[in-house]
Image (tube, rainbow, N blue to C red):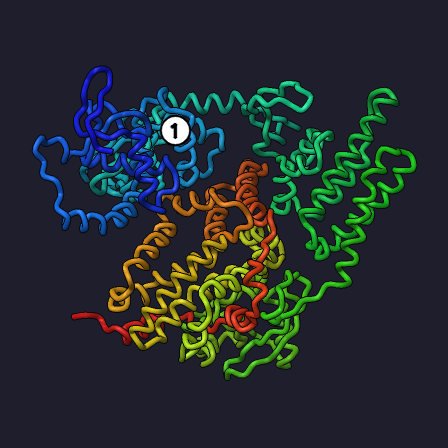
Amino acid sequence: MIRDRKYHLKTYRQCCVGTELVDWMMQQSPCVHSRTQAVGMWQVLLEEGVLNHVDQEHHFQDKYLFYRFLDDECEDAPLPTEEEKKECDEELQDTMLLLSQIGPDAHMRMILRKPPGQRTVDDLEFIYEELLHIKALSHLSTTVKRELAGVLIFESHPKAGTVLFNQGEEGTSWYIILKGSVNVVIYGKGVVCTLHEGDDFGKLALVNDAPRAASIVLREDNCHFLRVDKEDFNRILRDVEANTVRLKEHDQDVLVLEKIPAGNRVSNQGNSQPQHKYIVMSGTPEKILEHFLETMRLEATLNEATDSVLNDFIMMHCVFMPNSQLCPALMAHYHAQPSQGTEQEKMDYALNNKRRVIRLVLQWAALYGDLLQEDEAAMAFLEEFYVSVSDDTRMIAALKEQLPELEKIVKQHKVLLQLFNTSDDRTQKRQPIRGSDEVLFKVYCIDQTYTTIRVPVSSSVKEVISAVADKLGSGEGLIIVKMSSGGEKVVLKPHDVSVFTTLSVNGRLFACPRDQFDSLAPLPEQEGPSTGTVGTFELMSSKDLAHQMTIYDWELFNCVHELELIYHTFGRHNFKKTTANLDLFLRRFNEIQFWVVTEICLCSQLSKRVQLLKKYIKIAAHCKEYKNLNSFFAIIMGLSNVAVSRLSLTWEKLPSKFKKIYAEFESLMDPSRNHRAYRLTVAKLDPPIIPFMPLLIKDMTFTHEGNKTFTDNLVNFEKMRMIANTVRTVKFCRSQSFNPDAALTNKNHQDVRSYVRQLNVIDNQRTLSQMSHRLEPRRA
């Protein structure tokens, strides 16, 4: 690869080609997931002076360009010895891992140093993807973020104490902190606050065209910024406003649309589609609904329509237009009659209008599925709507084709309501838990006795207190407390719901008068096991364990309704809905994590602990193979828990082959650049996938907290669209059903199946750390 090369009659000594270096990097390490990532890794080495372009002209590119390593610049550089080669081979994977973590930053800097006019489409997409995860930009629309990708400039300063600008100066730029921190200083007051990575400053002076209100001073060395200059900033604002259409009623905005490029697609009929389309940015709930009904394409198939923006409305309407408002509005739209036009025009309008409402209702019912049983108003609406459509088919024959589907939905939900029941036995196949399902639950008293109550899963704390009071004979001044195994106590609010499923792994519910709160203590049973089960599961094959874990995890994941993610993000108490299935799936992640730590900390024999490490790394590898990323991450996070990672004697004896596999797995868990390594891995997978659910929750929370739900009394529909897009990830992961490995399923694995479904763990981190120190005391 390193040799003399000729180009345009000139010989370049001892050099390599950019594309070949990228090929080599891709082959060397499983932690390199794309050519773009490899380019970033080589850019790090170029910035550090390890290699250079032969004419010092270029940053690193995946092209037929020549690069030379610094060691090869010298004419008589000695060749490495065999011992040096061996040492380098051993360090290669660690170096690759480090480069894979810092490469994306270098790639970003490389692109941002290019003049805006020289950035390629791929460059702009790369910057845009990075901007999605910057806190200061989370409230901006997709259009603005894409515009910013074209104008942002990279700026860095090496020394703390550098003044970026002074109070009173003219505002010329807006800054976003990529790395480091700055102090905000005001004359006469000193440092008023400190800003960190993801924060921004300097925008106010540009918006108001006023002098700088404060000075900005670097708080640490080597700070990196994204900069938007005033001219670009104002142009983007002007462009956004120029492409914004505002519909007003009584001098108030009721719908705000934005014109965006539609992409030049050609329809099936060969007609060119419009070059631009209008998307909803904000509006009143009624106007947003009206807009989607008016713009619905009736010629599209139901699947095409399902993939459209209409699905965002159907998925998110519970946030701003609950069923109690949506159902009457749909009924009113269905019966709406035009006041103008010929009789034929009126009939055509009425027919198309009714067909659009039917289409929306069918999509709405399909998304809600069994959850409609929980909503009496929605069920009553469906029946009334079916009767209305049925009556209309006598006069309007064109509606008949949609009637059977509507009838099926109404009857299906009636039948399901009668047949549905649930089982608490973990060894049985999981069925989705509904809010109306009743649960038998133990609530403990201060003397550690308990009372068993029977209430609906979606009961509020107030209703739980009432049920406990009925059993105890008195409920005056009672509070309900969540108690963890470590003794952490949380008093639940009266309106809290889903209280049974949001407990920690070994958590319990207590009821007591408020004045006895301080006397509450955990139960002995909350401590968890005192002996490990290594003797049981060391006899089970790693593949069988991973397979049975994946079957159980898929059952749990498959029970989670997409709407539970929305209830969880916006606060389940706001909807008075349970998120029981999501809670149990999230709890499973913690359970597996603590299972790994518990078994290792309960294993007193060093050689057995080493075997356990190997076993867990193998199970993780099989989980990854089965695309069970939730359990894969739970196991790796268990192994990286401080109670396990500090066991240096144990890790020292782990064979180097397993150390390398673990290092590769850890690289996928790297949180830098918003879990870029994980996201690149998932992007390559086809469904079925069991995703790393805590990260999905984090993404939705990030969007929710960074954007207001209402702006100027209008629904912020851009926010709804972003959250719906994340929820669609769950839909994609489940778009193919999971079929267990036939070869393994045919074996009798009842013991493995029972074991993975009933893990017994210690979930008190303090206890686990103490056990870890007893196994391997801190070295002097």
Q: Which residue is mark 1?
A: 123
Residue drawn where x is 65% and y is 61% of the image: 435
> Residue 222 sits in which quadrant?
top left
Residue situated in front as seen by the camera: 547 or 632 = 547
Rendered location of residue 226, percent (x, y): 33, 32
Residue drawn where x is 70% and y is 57% of the image: 374
Rendered location of residue 360, percent (x, y): 72, 39
Of helix, strand and loop, which one carries label 1? helix
Rendered location of residue 600, percent (x, y): 36, 71
For the C terminus, the quadrant is: bottom left
Which residue extends farthest top? Answer: 9
The crowd level at tag 1 (other Cα within 10 Å; few <14, some 14-19, many 20+) is: some
Give the side of residue 637 with respect to residue 154, left or right: right
Badge 1 amino acid: Asp
For the N terminus, the quadrant is: top left
Q: Is residue 528 above or below residue 4?
A: below
Q: Is residue 605 above or below residue 237?
A: below
